[in-house]
Amino acid sequence: MPGTSYYDVPPSAARLTGSLRDIGYDFQTAVADLVDNSIAAGAHRIGVELVFDPNASYVLIWDDGAGMGPAGLLEALRFGSRRAYATNELGRFGLGLKTGTFSQCRRLTAVSRQARHQARYHVRTLDLDYIERRDSWSVLADEQSDAIEEAVRILQDGPGTVIVWEKLDRVLPDRYAESGWGRRRLNMLAKKTADHLGLVFHRFIAGEREIEPVAISVNGEKLAAWDPFARDEEHTETVPEEIFEVENGDEPSEVVFRGYVLPPRDQFSSQEAFERLSGPLKWNRQQGLYVYRANRLVQYGGWSGLRGIDEHTKLARASIDFDTELDETFQINVAKMSVVLPPTLRNMLERPVHDLCARADSAYRRAASAAEPRRPSAAKASADGVALLEIGVALKAAMYENTDLPGFRKALDTFRRRHPEVSAALGI
Ligand SMILES: Nc1ncnc2c1ncn2[C@@H]1O[C@H](COP(=O)(O)OP(=O)(O)OP(=O)(O)O)[C@@H](O)[C@H]1O
Ligand SMILES: [Mg+2]
C-alpha cells in the first residue's frame, strides 16, 4: 500500500529449523506423515526401510507415485510449500515432509523421478548442519552417500520418490550409533512403525470405499490392514450409522458415526484373533472413538472426554469420519495426530456413544456371567440373570431414544437409589 512503511524480517533459518524439531512427532507418526505424501502422489506401493550401518544408519521411505521434477522438488523442500489442495487431499500445511523428518534426523534428501521411459532423477538435500552454519534456507544439489545410491537404485524401474533420512541423531544418539543396542532399537522401531501404519492406513491397504489399494511394506514385509472394528468376525455387532451435520461456514458438512461392539474373548473366531484385536494400546485403552480425516486415521483410543475408559465398555469402538473441509473445525494438528471434537458435535455424539457403551457393557456382563463357574443349583438363577440383563439393555436403549440425556440420567439415578438390587440384576 502506498505510504505504508514496513520492515521485512525473514526468520532465522538456523533457529526456526531447530525449533520445529519438537512439535510432537515420534518415529512412527513422522513416517506416517511421509506416507501421506506418497498416497497423495498416487502411489500403489510404498516401502519403509530402516537400515542399520554402524555410524551411518539410514531410513528410506519410497513410493511409486507420480514423482517430482526439479522445480517440484525445490517446492517440496520449502518450509511451507506453496500449493493448493483438492478436497480430501491428505496434505494441508506444506510442512509434514520437513517437520516429520527433522523430528528424527538432521539430513533429508529427496530423490525423485518423473520420467516414465528414462531413468532420469533429481537429488535435493536439506541438511540442518549446513543450514545452521550459513543461517540460510539452502537446498543442496546432487549430494552423495551410500543411502542416496540405494535410493537411486530403487527408482531404476519407474517413476516415484524416495525420501532418505540420514544423521539419525534423535533415533540413534551418538553413543548407540554403532552398538548392538542401536540395531535392536531400529528393529523395535520397525515393528512399531509396521503396527502404526497398518492401523492408520488400514482403509487404504484394504482398498475399502473404492480407494485404490496401496501396498505398504516395512523392511520388506508387506503390512496387513488392521481393522480396529473386527468387521470380519461373525459376532461383531454393528450399530446403524448416524450422520450429523456440523456448521462449516455457509454450508454444513457431514460427519458420520459408526458404532461397533466387538465380541468378547470366547466369541472370537480364535484366541489369536482376540489377541490381535487387542491393539497397540491393549483392549481397555483401545476402546473409544477412531477419528478419520479423509479415510486416514488421525486419533484413536478413549472417548475424547465424552466419558471415561471403563473395563465394562472395553468392547465398544466407533468410527467418526470427516472431510478435509472440516479441518479447521476439528483443529487438525501439523503432525496429523490429534483433533478436537467441535462442541456441537460433542453434544450430538453423547446419545449414540452412551447407547453403544450400554450395548458393550451388556455384552461384557453376559460374557462374564457365562464364564463364571457355578453350582448346578445356581444355574437357573444365572440363566434368569442373562435374560434380565437383556431386558435391562432393551429398557435402556428405549429410554435413550425417547428421553433427553439429563432427564434420562436423573431417572436412572433415582431407579438405582430406590432399587439397588433390581438395577444390578438388570445391569443398569
Ligand atoms: N512422495 C512424494 N511424492 C510426490 N510429491 C511429494 C512427495 N512428498 C512431498 N511431495 C510434495 O511436497 C509437498 C510438501 O510436502 P509436505 O509434506 O511438506 O507438505 P504437504 O503434504 O503439502 O502438507 P502437510 O504439512 O499437511 O503434510 C507436497 O505438497 C507435495 O507436493
Ligand atoms: Mg505432507
Image (cartoon, rainbow, N blue to C red):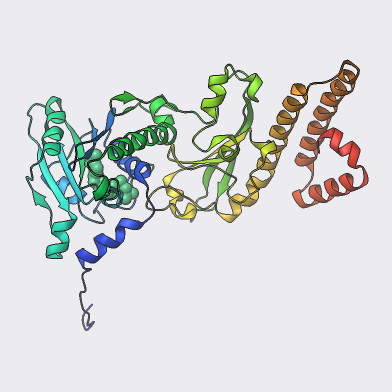
Corner quadrant of residue 377: top right
The residue sitting at 12% across, 46% down in the picture is 124
69 or 419: nearer the viewer: 419
Q: Please name the residue shown 89% across and 23% down the image.
A: 381
Which image quarter holds the C terminus?
A: top right
Q: Is residue 376 above or below residue 52?
A: above
Q: Position of residue 123 (x, y in %)?
A: 11, 42
Report the number of numbered marks. Answer: 0
Vertical relation: 282 (above or below) 339: above
In this picture, is 18 found above or below 25? below
Q: Residue at x 22, y 83 (%)?
A: 5
Image location (x, y in percent) of residue 212: 35, 26
- Left or right of 140: which side holds 345? right
Quarter occupied by the N terminus: bottom left
Left/right of residue 32 with respect to residue 377 in the rendered view: left
Considering depth in this image, is 190 or 197 the residue closer to the camera?
190
Q: Nearer the viewer, residue 285 or 33?
A: 285
Question: 376 left or right of 112?
Answer: right
Tell me which corner region of the image, top left, top right, bottom left or bottom right, holds residue 242.
Answer: top right
Q: Position of residue 292 (x, y in %)?
A: 47, 40
Q: Position of residue 64 (x, y in %)?
A: 22, 30
9 lies left or right of 359: left
Q: Does residue 271 appear anywhere in the picture?
A: yes
Tell me where residue 199 sits by quadrant.
top left
Residue at the right extreme, as displayed = 418
Asked whether residue 114 appears in the rendered view, the answer is: no
